Image (cartoon, rainbow, N blue to C red):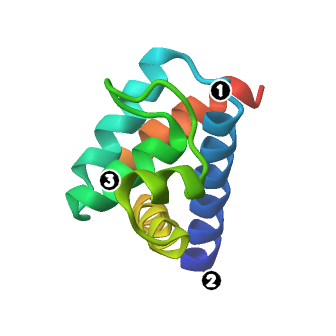
Amino acid sequence: MNHINNIENRIYVVNKILKYLKLDILNDEEKQAIYNIVMSTKKTDLQKRRFNMVYNLGPNIREHNTYKKVASFYDCSVGAVRTSTMSIVAGLYHLPDEKFSVLENILKKYEK
């Protein structure tokens, strides 16, 4: 039962962090930490780039993009962008504890 609670907590933390990214609430240092975590996942470079474009992460990304804008940029389907993004999200759910704790600590700052 503990595993179920753990994954539910991880889903909650990741989803809140993604919401804060979309709302542009997080500061640059926090965004950089999340970017570093995303880049360390065992996902393809293309999946990481698409995710970073959707969530405004990384040194060359200046604005949030919709799935449609990212799909247009990469000349692919919206579904391909969504699949890439969800692959990264799933990877964030299953991060090693030491990396996941970074996300938890960021969230704690905003949920006092």
Q: CA distance from mark 3 to mark 1?
A: 19 Å
The answer to which of 60 and 41 lies nearer the viewer is 60
Q: Residue furthest right?
A: 112
Q: CA distance from mark 1 to mark 2?
A: 35 Å
Q: Earlier in the sequence, mark 3 or mark 1?
A: 1
Secondary structure state at the residue bearing disc 3: helix
Q: Is residue 32 left or right of residue 22?
A: left
Disc 1: which residue = 24
Residue located at (71% from left, 32% from top): 23
Image coordinates for residue 60, horizontal then vertical, percent? 33, 26
Q: Earlier in the sequence, mark 1 or mark 2?
A: 2
Q: Amino acid at mark 1?
A: Asp
Q: Alpha-carbon neighbours of circle 1 within 10 Å: few (<14), some, or many (≥20)?
A: some
Q: Is residue 26 left or right of residue 73?
A: right
Disc 2: which residue = 1
Position of residue 76 relative to residue 45, above or below, is: below
